[in-house]
Image (tube, rainbow, N blue to C red):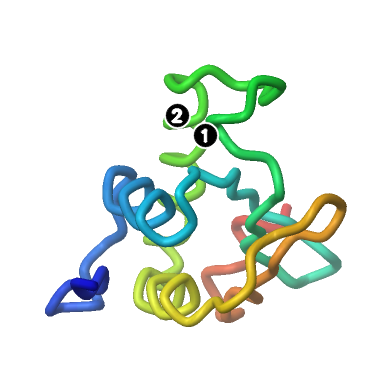
Amino acid sequence: MDNPIPRKPSQPLEVEEVIRFLKKRWGVTYELKLLVKGKSLFLQMMWGFLEQQSFPLSEEKYREELAKIIDVINRLDQASEVRVWLLRQESKPRLGRALSLPLRADEGLEEFLL
């Protein structure tokens, strides 16, 4: 299996990169969401996925939503942490149980927690 992490892990994440990785790793493109809980921010991999008949988003809307999430991750300088989390994640989300990654809090986080 070729390494999905680029040679320079600090490079910004891209929509196509995340989609390729999800499909290669799990065979489907899981929905990713940001969750604000108090003063903490989490990236969650949900159990729903684009290839599901009942998935509520079109591919275009899925990509738009993913781009917004990736923009926040990149602006928080968390691309490397997200790549490593996706690479090391051994389980996959199950119905009613998302996988969560706490995003590192710093001064820049407050702008996302309004």
Q: Quadrant of residue 99?
A: bottom right
Give yes or no for contact between labels 1 and 2 (Cβ–Cβ under 8 Å).
Answer: yes
Please determine whether, in this image, residue 101 is positioned above or below residue 47.
below
Q: Nearer the viewer, residue 23 or 74?
A: 23
For this orientation, the residue located farthest to the left is 7
The residue nearer to you, when weighing 82 against 71, is 82
Q: How far separated are the C-alphas under marks 1 and 2?
A: 4 Å
**Residue 56's disc number:** none
Give the residue type that dot 1 points to: Glu
Q: Which residue is mark 2?
A: 64
Local crowd size for mark 2, using a 10 Å CA cut-off: few (<14), some (14–19), many (≥20): few
Q: Quadrant of the N terminus?
A: bottom left
User: How many marks on residues?
Assistant: 2
Q: Is residue 8 above or below residue 70?
A: below
Instruction: Say which residue label 1 marks.
Output: 65
Q: Dot 2 lies on which element?
A: helix
Residue 21 horizontal side relative to residue 2, left or right? right
Q: Nearer the viewer, residue 21 or 53?
A: 53
Q: Position of residue 27 (x, y in %)?
A: 45, 49
Residue 65 location (% of width, % of height): 52, 34
Residue 9 point in image, percent of width and height: 24, 77
Residue 105 is situated, as x and y percent measured from the top left of the image, at: 61, 79
- Residue located at (82% from left, 60% from top): 97
* Residue 101 to residue 65: above or below: below
